[in-house]
């Protein structure tokens, strides 16, 4: 059991949303709970999960287990921000994620902030457009993060060197300063 506890301690989990639902039965109402949890190792891996149960702690445990099973790796520039700006959507929920200079911090709404903190991102500017439903916002954020690519991956795909890919970024930044 201690081996599992050691493995679980590396993940930081954030409860994003709890929804209480009622089923009307003959004797009154039966309450159930749905939990949305985001889990991350704060080093570039993050996942989210949903759990439903009759009690809140059980719903959170189920959601956490689901989140750990569905983790994705996100390439981060200097371990703190995105490599490039990216858009994501799920249903009516749309998000725009922008890389930011050091010291900016996480500028994002509730559910997106939980994803970025679990991911270990320190500087990002994000805007949610459309749906404010936490489930759709988290899914749209994950859609955007899945579209994020690193210069190393782009260079490998194009058969070029990483320096050729990043040289254009430095030239573009130099022109912006002039």
Image (cartoon, rainbow, N blue to C red):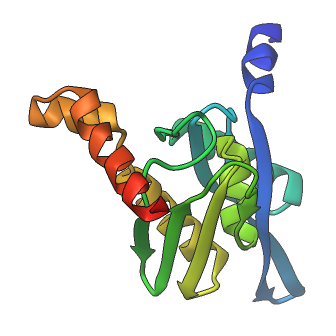
Percent across and percent down for residue 115 are: 66, 55
Q: x and y percent of residue 45 in the render?
A: 57, 36
What residue is rendered at 79% in x and 87% in y? 25
- Taking the image as shown, residue 97 lies to the left or right of residue 34, namely left
The extreme left residue here reads 159
Image quadrant where residue 64 sits: top right
How many numbered markers are drawn? 0
Residue 131 sits in quarter: bottom right
Is residue 6 found left or right of 127 in the rendered image?
Answer: right
Q: Is residue 152 above or below residue 64?
A: above
Q: Note whether residue 53 is visible.
A: no
Up-down relation of residue 37 to residue 70 (above or below): below
Q: Nearer the viewer, residue 84 or 68?
A: 84
Nearest the eye: 31 or 119:
119
Q: Would residue 113 be seen by someone viewing this image from the given angle?
A: yes
Q: Measuring from the top left, give residue 146's x and y in whole percent.
A: 39, 52
Is residue 25 or residue 64 the one in the foreground? Answer: 64
At a point 57% along the width and 34% down the height, the residue shown is 78
**Whole-percent x, y for residue 166 in the image:** 32, 39
Q: Is residue 33 above or below residue 1?
A: below
Quadrant where the C terminus lies?
bottom left
* Quadrant of the snapshot with the N terminus: top right
The residue drawn where x is 27% and y is 34% is 153
Looking at this view, is 135 or 111 the one in front?
111
Q: Looking at the image, which residue is at 42% across and 74% down?
A: 89
């Amino acid at each position: 059991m201690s081996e599992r506890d050691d493995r679980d301690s590396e993940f930081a989990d954030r409860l994003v949303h709890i929804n209480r639902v009622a089923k009307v039965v003959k004797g009154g109402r039966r309450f159930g709970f749905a939990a949305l949890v985001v889990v991350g190792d704060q080093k570039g891996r993050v996942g989210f999960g949903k759990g439903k149960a009759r009690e809140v702690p059980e719903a959170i445990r189920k959601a956490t287990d689901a989140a750990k099973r569905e983790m994705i790796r996100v390439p981060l520039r200097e371990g703190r921000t995105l490599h490039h700006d990216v858009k994501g959507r799920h249903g009516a929920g749309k998000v725009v994620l922008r890389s930011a200079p050091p010291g900016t911090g996480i500028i994002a709404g509730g559910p997106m902030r939980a994803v970025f903190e679990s991911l270990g991102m320190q500087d990002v500017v994000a805007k949610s457009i459309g749906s404010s439903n936490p489930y759709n916002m988290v899914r749209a954020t994950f859609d955007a993060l899945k579209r994020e690519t690193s210069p190393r991956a782009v260079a490998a795909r194009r058969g070029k060197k990483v320096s050729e890919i990043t040289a254009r970024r430095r030239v573009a930044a130099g022109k912006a300063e002039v």
